[in-house]
Structures are given as C-alpha cells and as structure tokens.
Amino acid sequence: MHIPVISSSYLNIMELMYQSYIPRILNAALEVGLFEELSKKDLSLSELSDQLKADERIVEALVDLLIAIDLIDEDKENFGLTAMAKDFFVQSSPVNQISSIQTYNGSAGPFDNLQEVLRNGPPEFNDRMWASKEVATGMERQNLAGTVQTVTQFVKETSEFANCEKMCDFAGSIGYYSFAFAQENPGLISHVYDLPEVAELGQELKSGEEHRDRVLFHGFDMNAEDSFGKDYDFFFSSHYLYELNFRNRLTDFFVRVNRATRMGGLFVSNHIAPPKNGEKYPGLAIVELMTRGMGYPTHLLSEADLKAALSEAGFGRFNTQFVTNVSVYPFLLLSAVKTKEV
Ligand SMILES: C[S@@+](CC[C@H](N)C(=O)[O-])C[C@H]1O[C@@H](n2cnc3c(N)ncnc32)[C@H](O)[C@@H]1O
C-alpha cells in the first residue's frame, strides 16, 4: 500500500452523507413524541426520558444532536425547543411541517431501529462487528480518504519516530496505519494485534503488498487478557480505547502498555474527542447516537482522560493536535513518551 496523495477533500461529501441520516433521526424523535413533550415545558434529561419512557443514554445522545442542529436549546440542566422546532415540529403550530418531514422518512441505515432503541434500550453490542472483510476494508478506505495522511504527518513530526524500529499497532485491523508508517520509516517493523479472525484477514488481504515483510499480524483477544508483545519503541492505538475509558480501565491498560514499551518509547493515540470549548458538531453527535444505539458505550475519549491515565501509567511529554477539517467528527491526535517504569 502507498499512502494516496489527495488533492481534494472528502469531508464535504462525507458531511452530505451524514446529513442523509437526519430525516430518519428526526422522524424517530417525532414518533416518540419528543417535540410535543418539550413544547409543554422545558425538561431535564431524566424528566424527558421518563416522560418518553425512553432509554436515558440514548435520549442524551439524541438531544445532543438536536442541539447541534438547532432544534433544542440547553439552559443549565434543562432542555427546551428552539424557535425553529416550535414553529415546524410541534402539532399545535399552524405552520408545522410534520407531515412533510415524514415524507423524508425512507432509509435503510443505522437509525431505522432508533424508535425501538429509544423505547427498549440498545441491543447487546456485537464485538465482532469489525471482524469481516467488508467492514475492515471499508474502514481502511475511509481512513485512507484523509485521516491516514493526517495521522502519518503527525507521527512523522515527533522526534522519536524516525528512530523507531519495533511498533505495536494495537487493534490495528488489517494494518493500514502500519503500512503507512512502514512507508515513511524503512527501519520500522510493525506488529499488528487484532482479533484472530481479523489477523487472518490481514494476512490474506495484504499478502502481495509492498512492505508486507515488515508488517506482521498477530491474533489476540483483549478480553482474554492475551499478551500483545513487548520491547516496543512505538505503540500506536487508534479508535479502540473508548470502552476501556468508559469502564475506568484505561490506566490499567496503559500500565500494560508501559511494561511493553522501552524507556523513551513513543505512544500515539488517534481517537474521537469532544471539543474543549463545548462547540457542537452534528457529525460527532450522529456518531455518538449511532454508537450508543448499537449498544457500544461511547465513541468519545477526552484529552483530559487520556492524559490523566497516561500520566498515572508513566507517560509524559504530551503533544496534541485537534483535527476538525478532515472528518465529520473531530479527532484528537496525542503523542506521549514513556518517562517512568511503573
Ligand atoms: C474501530 S476498529 C479500529 C481499527 C483501527 N485501529 C482504526 O483506527 O481504523 C476497532 C478494532 O478493534 C478490534 N477489536 C475489537 N474487540 C477486540 C478484542 N477483544 N481484542 C482485540 N481486538 C479487538 C476490532 O477487530 C477492530 O479492528
């Protein structure tokens, strides 16, 4: 694989595609009566969830999106309708557009069961959802449309990367980040750790690829506490740490990473992060609603949580870049260095 050189941006198209989810989401909100409830009076999250008899964490993510697209206002702990929602989404308004909005309801996307999820909560999460050829190659393609380039540039700008020789691409799917880093550092050997079926897919799909001799796939299951190797001078983690943080297991995990990394070794994280200034991004809110609706706890990992856990686990010398112009959701790139044994 060669890192594609891109002269345009996929972001605009991606934004349009994401917006195509909105009619289904708005209709689920209409169907459960969310706008009608809030038209009676402003409500807190738990009051609103009670009134709707809906799952509170899903309502929270839905409300967050409705704030981002200017249909709900937040005042302290309470939510109310904006002028636009009062005009167009409430039955008693003479200019309500509900029946028109209902005609935009056709979809076969991730929100088709939102109403059901609001009522009954999400299904049990399928942790094998990324373990198919279609999903893995789809993720690769999406990452290659700008993100791999941005992440690779960030990694290259660290003073450690050029001298790194042994890398762990943790939960690295079929290795697209490893191939990009291997292209930029001819002395680097990357060990991609992922579920056994994904490691097999990587071996199969990447068999003829350039730099294949320096990208090695290993099957492992994090839930079985399998080993993920040792003596790394570069540890890379992309879009995996959300659940560990949600379950307060991030520091313990970073202690394991510390023990698998040499002193002075580089750690780089690529994860979706909430903006520090509270700015709202519809794409970010859509991803979070989709995530929770699938039964996965969150797709957000804050800079503060990441730094706190890394510091406790013997990492320091942080460097960050908050990226908002590549994808519909902002993501945080963070580099750190192992400064202490723990
Ligand atoms: C969201 S994908 C991220 C893939 C890649 N790192 C990226 O940034 O595009 C999460 C990855 O974690 C892997 N994964 C999920 N559960 C796992 C487990 N229990 N043990 C090891 N890997 C797991 C999945 O197979 C998948 O490749």
Image (spheres, rainbow, N blue to C red):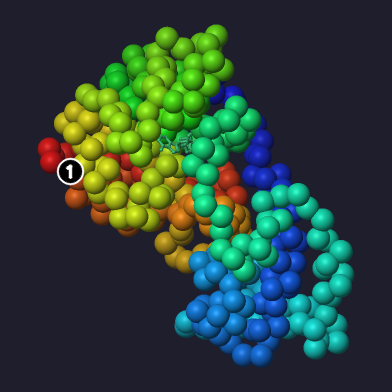
Instruction: Look at 34% across and 14% down and name the residue there.
Output: 187
Name the residue at the bottom extreme.
40
Q: Is residue 232 left or right of residue 105?
A: left
| Residue at which label 1 appears | 314
- Residue 192 % position (x, y): 40, 25
- Residue 296 % position (x, y): 49, 52
Q: Quadrant of residue 270?
A: top left
- In the rendered image, is residue 237 in sight? yes
- Residue 113 % position (x, y): 68, 58
Q: Is residue 102 above or below residue 202?
A: below
CB of mark 1 near ligand 1 (< 8 Å):
no
Q: Is residue 188 left or right of residue 89?
A: left
Circle 1 crowding by C-alpha within 10 Å: few under 14, some 14–19, many from 20: many
Q: Number of marks in the image?
A: 1
- In the rendered image, is residue 303 in sight? no
Name the residue at the left extreme.
341
Q: Nearer the viewer, residue 242 or 155?
A: 242
Q: Nearer the viewer, residue 80 or 52?
A: 52
Q: Amino acid at mark 1?
A: Gly
Instruction: Look at 21% across and 49% down and name the residue there.
Output: 311
Q: Nearer the viewer, residue 202 or 117?
A: 117
Q: Is residue 160 above or below residue 129?
A: above
Q: Is residue 132 above or below residue 251?
A: above
Q: Quadrant of residue 220?
A: top left
Instruction: Look at 71% across and 50% down and name the residue there.
Output: 109
* Quadrant (top left, top right, bottom left, bottom right) of the N terminus: top right
Instruction: Look at 82% across and 56% down and name the residue there.
Output: 106
- Residue 36 % position (x, y): 70, 83
Dot 1 falls on a residue whose secondary structure is loop
* Quadrant (top left, top right, bottom left, bottom right) of the C terminus: top left
